[in-house]
Image (cartoon, rainbow, N blue to C red):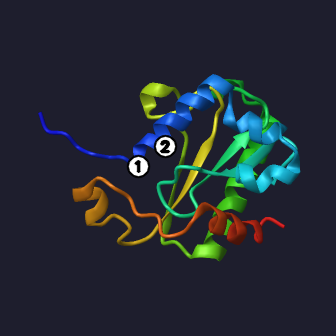
Amino acid sequence: MEIIWAPWRLSYVSKVTKEEKKGCFICKAIEDNPSKDKENLLLYRGQKAIVILNRFPYNTAHLMVCPIRHTGNFLSLLPEELAEIDELLKRSVRAIKRAYNPDGFNIGLNLGKVSGGSVDTHIHYHVVPRWLGDTNFMPVIGGAKVIPQSLDETYDILKKFWE
C-alpha cells in the first residue's frame, strides 16, 4: 500500500471534528461580538447573509457567502435570503476582482456530505478566485496547494472593499 503524507490536513481534520462537537462555526461567527469579526474572518454582516473567509482556502481570497439563518436545506432558503446572497456573491466577485485581479472564478455550493461538503448543516456558497496557471505541479504531483498569503493579510485587503 502506498502512503501519501499530507500533514497539513491534520489541522483541518482536527478543526472540523472540534467544530462539529462545538456547533456550527458559521453561527458562532455570527453570534460572536462584531469586535471578533477579524478573528472569525467575518468580512461583512448583512441583514440576511454574511461573507466570511474560508479558513482552509483552495486559493487566496477564497470566501463564502452564507445565510444568517442556520439551515442545511437549500430548498428552505427564503426569497429575501436568496436575494441578499445573490447580491453578496456579486459584491464578493467585485471586491476580489478589485483586490486581486483574478482571471476567473469558481462559484458554487456543495449540498450534503456526499457532494464534497465538509459542513452540510449550514448552507454556504464558495467564491474561489482562479488565475491562469494556478494549477501547477504542487497540487498535481505533490498533492499540496501553496497559498501565498496569510489569512490575516487577505482579510485586511478584502475588508477595505467591504467598508
Residue depicted at x 78% and y 46%: 84
Residue depicted at x 36% and y 46%: 7
Q: What residue type is labelled 2?
A: Ser
At which x and y percent is residue 20? 60, 26
Q: Which residue is under mark 1? A: 8
Residue depicted at x 49% and y 41%: 12
Viewer-proximal residue among 80 and 130: 130
* Quadrant location, the N terminus: top left
Pointer 2 with pointer 1, Cβ within 8 A: yes
Question: Eyeballing the image, is 1 above or below 96?
Answer: above
Q: What residue type is labelled 1?
A: Trp
Can residue 23 be seen at all in this image of the molecule? yes
Horizontal side of 106 relative to 145 (left or right) equals: right
Can residue 110 be seen at all in this image of the molecule? no
Q: Which residue is under mark 2? A: 11
Question: Eyeballing the image, is 7 above or below 147?
Answer: above
At which x and y percent is residue 144? 34, 56
**Under tag 2, what secondary structure?**
helix
**Under tag 1, what secondary structure?**
loop
Q: How far apart are marks 2 and 1 (CA)?
A: 6 Å
* Quadrant location, the C terminus: bottom right
Question: Eyeballing the image, is 101 above or below 111?
Answer: below
Residue depicted at x 68% and y 60%: 92
Viewer-proximal residue among 87 and 159: 159
At which x and y percent is residue 96? 63, 68
